[in-house]
Amino acid sequence: MTEKDYSFIKQDWEKRIMTYPGMTREEAEDCLKLAVSLVEKGLEKFTHDFPDCNTENGRYPVSENREWTTGFWTGQIWLAYEYAKDKQDKKAETFKTAGEIQVESFLHRIEEKVDVNHHDMGFLYTPSCVAAYKLTGNETARKAALLAADNLMGRFQEKGGFFQAWGELGAKENYRLIIDCLLNMPLLFWASSVTGDESYQEKARIHIQTAMRHLIRPDHSTYHTYFFDPRDGSPVGGVTHQGNRDGSAWSRGQAWGIYGSAMAYRYVRDKEYIDIFRKVTDFFLENLPGNLIPYWDFDFKEGSGQSWDSSAAVIGVCGMLEMAKYLEKDEAEKYTAMAGRLLLAAAKECRVKSPADSDGLLLHGTYAHASPNNPCQNRGVDECNTWGDYYYMEALTRLVKDWELYW
Ligand code: GLY
């Protein structure tokens, strides 16, 4: 870093992060090449089947197409397809064929309503089917993704103005939104764009507005989930599900806030979402430990011995790289520089180097960590998870080329 190049870096925490090297395009290319080779290896196990949410002792259990995470594996296949195609490598056909097999599974899943009684239609159908449609014009993928968008629309609650995340619709104990859902909204903007039916994006805009109004705390940390009163939609309060406590900042939730606010701005173009992006991103960056990989909750600091969540780092990187497209030069450079530093740190600390080490791409994630103040049991602690692998690959792809989003 030279003062001249980065004179707009003012805060001490910004200066601290800028002392780290950032990832170069060549380094990103090397990491992506390795990731693509690991995905190719993964196809041996996961073409007709899917990896489960997280590895267990470094290996993904084989799963049917269920849970909220299978789309991330198909998304990795599509990113590998793009990489191979750009290189005019005939392996592109192998990835395409595998992606198409998985798309059929996603159509079956939504038609038969297999584990789709929740809001995560975007996580499932954007990197799998919207990606397939955008990249190859696959009509089965279009059909499946539109059915998924319709399914999500059924979870909209007029009272409160939000998509209910989980559980029986309208039940008091389930009447809440969660910050992660900001990443389900691009599916609805896509559905409006391909059908001309504005109702999808109208509901998405209302949900985004509600989420932004209630999830960001005065100190710019975020609630994971927020309850409303089903009788009249009035706000009740923020509660954690996967964080350390109701008032803490679950690091992946904060990262969903970074990428979610970038997506909100991408689609809605309300400058308020740029301001929210700055706030939640700066909270995230300022609270990073020395190695730039967040602990699973920002309650935990250097020396806490708690597990990291590498997936939060790479989700945040993708959000910063996306938002940089819409910012003035100095700010765009600042967030691009921060993203490059986090990505290099994640690659150095967490990258899987060989299939002998793990089935995944990015080590040291945490799916859920038990706490006396949350309902979770330990799950996928210090393991790879499919979304960490996916967003790591997406982040690398964003550095390597001018990437057309699936989202
Ligand atoms: N969307 C659920 C999670 O981030 O664990």
Image (tube, helix red, strand yellow):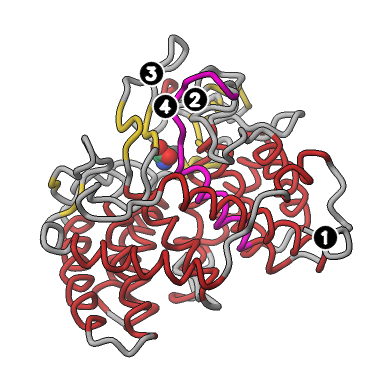
Earlier residue among tags 1 and 2? 1
Secondary structure under tag 3 reads: loop
Earlier residue among tags 4 and 1? 1
Q: Return the mark for residue 174.
A: 4
- Tell whether 270 sits left or right of 385: right
Earlier residue among tags 1 and 3? 1
Residue position for label 3: 370
Amino acid on which the number 2 mark rests in the picture: Gly
Amino acid on which the number 1 mark rests in the picture: Thr
Q: Nearer the viewer, mark 4 or mark 1?
A: 1
Query: Camera-side residue: 397 or 179?
Result: 397
Range of residues picked out in magenta: 302-322
Q: Nearer the viewer, mark 1 or mark 2?
A: 1
Amino acid on which the number 4 mark rests in the picture: Asn
Disc 4 to disc 1, C-alpha distance: 51 Å
Query: Camera-side residue: 259 or 8?
Result: 8
Residue 309 in view of the camera: yes
Earlier residue among tags 2 and 4? 4
Where does ligand 1 appear, by image quarter? top left
Within 10 angstroms of label 1, few (less than 14), some, or many (20 or more) residues?
Answer: few
Residues at discs 4 and 1 in contact (Cβ within 8 Å): no
Disc 1 to disc 3, C-alpha distance: 43 Å
Q: Which residue sits at x=38%, y=18%?
A: 370
Residue position for label 1: 2
Secondary structure under tag 1 reads: loop
Q: Is residue 360 magenta?
A: no
Residues at discs 1 and 3 in contact (Cβ within 8 Å): no
Q: Is mark 4 within 8 Å of ligand 1?
A: no
Quadrant hosting residue 111: bottom left
Disc 4 to disc 3, C-alpha distance: 21 Å
Amino acid on which the number 3 mark rests in the picture: Ala
